[in-house]
Structures are given as structure tokens and as C-alpha cells.
Amino acid sequence: MHSVRRRWAAGLLLVPLLTGCFAARDGSPYDAGAGAGGGRLRVAMAFPPAERFSPYGADATVLSRLGVTGGLTRLDGNGGAVPALAESWARESGGGWVFTLREARFQDGTEVTPAAVAGALTHATHADPGPAALTGVTLTAEAMGERRVRVATATADSALPLRLSSPSLAILSPKAYRTKAGTGAAGSDKSGTGAAGSDKSGAAEGRSDTPDGKAAVDPAGTATGPFSLTRTTGATRATLHRFDDYWGGLAHASGLDVRFIADGTARTNALRSGEVDMAEAVPVSQAATLDRPTVREVPTARTTALFLNTRSGPFADPAVRAAAREAVDASALAEDVYEGHADTGRGLFGPALTWAAGERPRPSGRPAAKRPGNTALTLATYDNRPELPEVAQVLQQQLRKAGFSVKLEVREYSRLESDALAGKFDAVVAARNTMLDTGDPVSYLADDFTCDGGYNLARVCDKAVDRAVAEAGSRADDAARHRAALA
């Protein structure tokens, strides 16, 4: 299902946010910068940090959404690359790109220099696991003069400006890479191990000044966004202060007080009771209970899908996968579970992407379905997005009706991801923003559906698919890449 039609936005914006005028809980105004107006915002987020705010995994998205980090480029409303820390860029004849930096500062007061940018990108290339935006890409970066950085890939990459918009390729100051491992963000308490107690960047004890991906990376006070991460309390709370030297101008709010609340009903109640000013991923079933001016509605590029484990278990058999596919009625999910606030899926890319809204190639060569014969399987999902457990329950009923024996497992996302990627479930229901990592559909396909993909929930490994994705990636023209992605 595509979360597009009449879909409630993940972030619910209140009128006070739009006016930039807030009061402290005791009724007195917060200190606001000169000409900035606004006090602190209280925010409820759905996904707790799972990796001590590492910029290279899922937490990179959290940092980006909170306005902590930024990269050389960003995406506009149409998914195109526009200036951020880089004010312009040009492609070289040899396949590299030269990015010209704007004048900007890191939150630790140091200048954003070509050497610092090149160093940050080099650290990202050595992270383990690597950032999703670099799946299948070998990237190098080097300083060129006072304001320019040359970024090159082993093979020509026409999507590089899009790729550099990824939250996992955020630019941090050199200080970020010289922190002690295992302590979490600066100013955090020592229980800050993340919801899963793991750090996918592979932090090791001690300090390191080398870009080997083994030292902890600390984004607290070292990023370039409008808000600086100043304190964390485990995986439950975070405090951010406005960064007054942000290159894009002063933020209206003087800071953010963030609570990570995995339960959707609890997030809604916090919003309704006035405990928070903003909440993301409010359940569709409860959106109608909120005051109409509280809710903002936008199209999204998010697709909710059932991923079948193609490498092990019953769904390693294509004929059994065909039986599951025939059992699923996606229109019932869109109309009933999402109460009409989603579109029935047609492929991976939804109509919020204008280039995907028209006719698309029809699948061919699919095998005939095999009767499942009470085949047992485990279907997993997470509850940070409130509709997903209900989607999974409906799918459980549909699959049972087709003859499958289905066990349902629901966890909080940070406790599910590693097992899902390791293939410990037969099927997973997940919601994926297909444009999140790079804005490039071919890069998304490479990360999610190739043998070396870093977020391959379906565990697809097919050399023909790899070749097709690689061929699509060779297209330089955006329209040609879009057509190849759909094919």
C-alpha cells in the first residue's frame, strides 16, 4: 500500500509551530534569540535511537528529522538534489564531481572546510555496516583549494548529488570522530546504549583518529543543522538547543525537548493532552479524534509491503510465494486498516512520485501457485507505526484462508530489525520510504533487492536482478533511470 491518498502526515503540526510562539510549562516565556521569536518545542518521536545516534544506521534518519545533521545536498519536493552545505556542483569529464562549499560552521564553532568534508565522507565509506546510500558504490573524497571538494566513484555515478543528500552521509566536524566508544552522545547518561543495546558502526574501546569505522561517531555538538544535540537519556529522551550560527538562519524554536514513545496511542494521548507540541506517526484510527487544525496532510513516498524470505523457509519456493501473493487483498488493507488514507499498491513506487503514477510494465513469467497445504510460517512486524500490527493481523487471516498456518510476532522496531535482516522470519510487514536514503529509485533497488543490499528484507539474491539494477544505474538521464527502475 502506498501512503499517499488523504494520508495523515507523520509529523503533526500545531498552529503554534507555524507562528513560532511558545511558552514554558510554567507559563513564562523561554529565552529566544534576537529576532528569532519562539520558545522550546516538545516533540514525540516514534522510533527510539537504536544505535547510540550513530549517523550510519537507522538513527541517521532520526538525527535528520530533528534538524541536527545536514549534508552537501538535500532533496526538494520533487526528489531533486538542491544546495545545502554545497552551494553548487559540476561534473568532471572523468566521472568525478566538484562541489563548491558555502560559508558555514559546525556546531562546535569550527569552520566547514573542504578537508573536514572530505574527512567526514571518508569516515562514512569505512563504516561497518556501511551507509545504505553507498550500497554498491566505492566513493572517494578529497579537498581541492579553499572551498571545493572533489567526490568520485569507481564507476560513473550520475546520481551522486542525490546520493549525498542521504542522512547517513551527513557532514560532521573532525571532533565527532575522536570520541570514546560506548558512551553515546556527549552529555548523555551512561545508560545510553540505545533500545537494542547495539552500535552498528562497530564501536571499539579507546580513541581513534583513523577512518576505519571502528571508533564511535558522536554527532552531539559536531553537526551543521539548526539544532544541536546536547543531552540524551538512554533511548527515551533527548535535549536539543538551537544552533545560532546555522547557515540557513535562526530556527524559530529555541530548542527541542524530545521524547521517544514507541506506542502510537501513547503518542496521540501526549499530543491530545498538551504534553507535547508535535507527534509523528499518529494512528490513522485516532487522527479523526484530533482537532482538525492540529493535523497536516501530505503525500508521501512510503510503501507498506509484505516481504517474503526468498532464501530460506517455505518462501524459498517461488510457487509458495505465488500462493501467498494470490492470497493477499491489498485493497482491503488500504480501505479498512488505513480507512481510505492509503492507495492500493501497484509495484514498489507509489503515485506520490509523479514519474511512477502512469502506466508501468506488467510482471511476466511468474510461476503458478502451489497449494500451501497448511505450511507453517512466522510473520513479523513492528508497532512503532501503529497500523502495521493490524495490517499483519489481516494478512494473517488472509494467508490462513489460503491454507497457511501463520504465527504472528510483533516487536518494537529496534528489537526486530537485526533478526528480520538475518532471515529469522518467513515474512515481514514493513513500511519503507522508497526515497529516503538517496532520492534515487535505482539506489533504493540496489539496497533492498540485490545480493549485497544492506536492507534486503526479502533476502533476494538473483544475478539477473543484480544485472538489471546495475544496468539501470548506468543511465545518466533522470527519466531513463525512472523508466529502468519501474521495469
Image (cartoon, grey):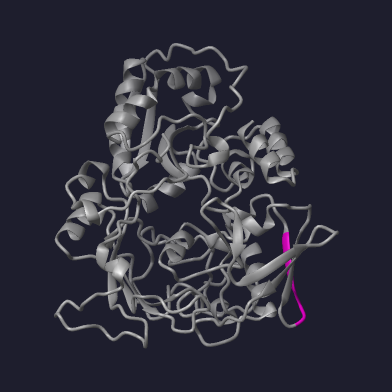
Closest to the observer: 173 or 381? Answer: 173
Q: Where the N terminus falls, by quadrant? A: top left
Question: Where's residue 10, x and y in %?
Answer: 35, 52
Question: Residue 144 lies in magenta, yes or no?
Answer: yes
- Residue 275 in view of the camera: yes
Asked whether 16 falls inside the magenta stretch, the response is no
As rendered, which of 173 and 148 lies closer to the eye? 148
Residue 343 in the image: above or below residue 70 = above
Q: Residue at x 43, y 46 (%)?
A: 300
| Residue at the (44%, 17%) spot, across then down | 326
Tell me which corner region of the image, top left, top right, bottom left or bottom right, holds residue 250: bottom left
Q: Position of residue 142 (x, y in %)?
A: 75, 72
What x and y, as percent, mark residue 140?
Answer: 74, 65
On screen, residue 399 versus residue 76, left or right, reads left
User: In this picture, which residue range is highlighted in magenta?
Assistant: 139-145
Q: Is residue 287 above or below residue 399?
A: below
Please give the name of the residue rendered at 30% of the width and 36% of the height, measured from the top-left corner.
338
Left or right: 106 as drawn, with respect to 20: right
